[in-house]
Image (cartoon, rainbow, N blue to C red):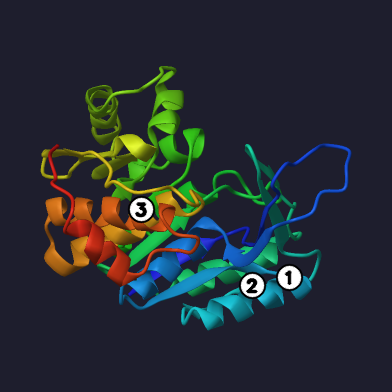
């Protein structure tokens, strides 16, 4: 079974304002509301691709109830933990001549809630997949990802981590099956700016040497790079298309990689499905569907 964890899910309220001006009353031309959070995005896209999974995390208040309703609507199984204090976040994303975001704080997650999460993780067994994605709320220990991987270390669970900086580096000693920084996040780890795929390969190999089994690096319109467990390096340009919404594209790439790997056990196919799934989400107002992914797979040649 595949499990995802979203510590701080949100209702994403995405609005388009033709000419946004600070200090003025602005009218929206379009409005969308989605369940947000990196783990939730991974779960929804996996379901769209035909892979059952269970979304774990925390929810609170009326916003939490709406997040659960929308997850149900997407057909995703879930086992969220209810938190008594506070509200699940509302994150506002404003699209205009540039994009702006206002993110909420989230509920007060207590130690008893974290203990309950560990009880749910007790059901994981050999070859299950666990996706840990996104930031850790300030009310939780900053070592949560590392603590979870240490807790599961003897179970042969394939753990995937999509996080930044120290959150990512600190888990490498526990040999995550996959990590997925983007090129900017990879550069931040080593204090460099990375713009070409060859530069990305060099530093992705360093993360592999530090413990990661597979390192998948997204580069937005420039494509992606995979340094695989078997030592192979796979690179590709991104499929061609018009970007409508970049939110969830990286999470979708993780979903596609999982789907491709489970289907074929082949890293090249996992990479191809990953990059096409990420692009399919970027080219749509919603998260990728299987049909959109399959269409892009016909148009891309891996290795370009």
Residue 124 visible in image: no
Q: Horizontal and vertical percent for residue 48?
A: 37, 73
The quadrant in which the C terminus is found is top left
The quadrant in which the N terminus is found is bottom left
Instruction: Give the distance between the C-alpha atoms of the residues marked 1 and 2, in whole angstroms.
Output: 6 Å
Q: Is residue 54 left or right of residue 106?
A: left
Residue ID at (72%, 59%) = 90
The crowd level at tag 1 (other Cα within 10 Å; few <14, some 14-19, many 20+) is some
Where does label 1 land, which residue? 63
**In front: 80, or 38?**
38
Q: Answer whether labels 1 and 2 touch (C-beta < 8 Å).
A: yes
First in sequence: mark 3 vs mark 2: 2
| SS type, badge 3 | helix
**In front: 49, or 151?**
49
First in sequence: mark 3 vs mark 1: 1
* Label annotation for residue 284: none
Where does label 3 land, which residue? 278
* Label annotation for residue 67: 2
Instruction: Give the distance between the C-alpha atoms of the residues marked 3 and 1, in whole angstroms.
Output: 27 Å
Q: Horizontal and vertical percent for residue 267?
A: 15, 52
Give the label, 3 or 2, closer to the camera: 3
Residue 163 visible in image: yes
């Amino acid at each position: 079974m595949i499990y995802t964890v979203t510590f701080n899910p949100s209702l994403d309220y995405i609005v388009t304002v033709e000419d946004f001006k600070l200090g003025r009353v602005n009218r929206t031309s379009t409005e969308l509301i989605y369940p947000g959070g990196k783990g939730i995005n991974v779960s929804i896209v996996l379901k769209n691709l035909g892979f059952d999974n269970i979304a774990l995390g925390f929810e609170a208040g009326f916003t939490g109830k709406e997040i659960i309703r929308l997850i149900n609507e997407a057909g995703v199984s879930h086992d969220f933990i209810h938190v008594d204090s506070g509200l699940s976040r509302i994150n506002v994303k404003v699209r205009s001549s540039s994009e702006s975001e206002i993110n909420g704080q989230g509920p007060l997650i207590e130690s008893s809630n974290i203990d309950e999460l560990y009880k749910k993780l007790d059901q994981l067994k050999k070859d299950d997949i666990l996706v840990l994605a996104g930031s850790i709320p300030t009310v939780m220990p900053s070592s949560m990802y590392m603590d979870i991987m240490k807790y599961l270390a003897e179970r042969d669970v394939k753990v995937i981590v999509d996080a930044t900086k120290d959150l990512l580096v600190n888990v490498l000693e526990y040999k995550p099956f996959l990590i997925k920084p983007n090129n900017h996040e990879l550069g931040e780890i080593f204090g460099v700016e990375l713009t070409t795929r060859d530069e990305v390969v060099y530093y992705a190999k360093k993360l592999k040497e530090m413990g990661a089994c597979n390192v998948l690096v997204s580069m937005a319109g420039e494509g992606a790079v995979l340094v695989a467990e078997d030592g192979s390096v796979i690179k590709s340009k991104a499929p061609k298309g018009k970007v409508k919404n970049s939110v969830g594209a990286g999470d979708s790439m993780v979903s596609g990689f999982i789907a491709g790997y489970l289907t074929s056990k082949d890293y090249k196919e996992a990479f191809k499905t990953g990059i096409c799934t990420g692009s399919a989400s970027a080219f749509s107002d919603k998260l990728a569907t299987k049909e959109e992914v399959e269409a892009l797979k016909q148009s891309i040649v891996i290795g370009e």
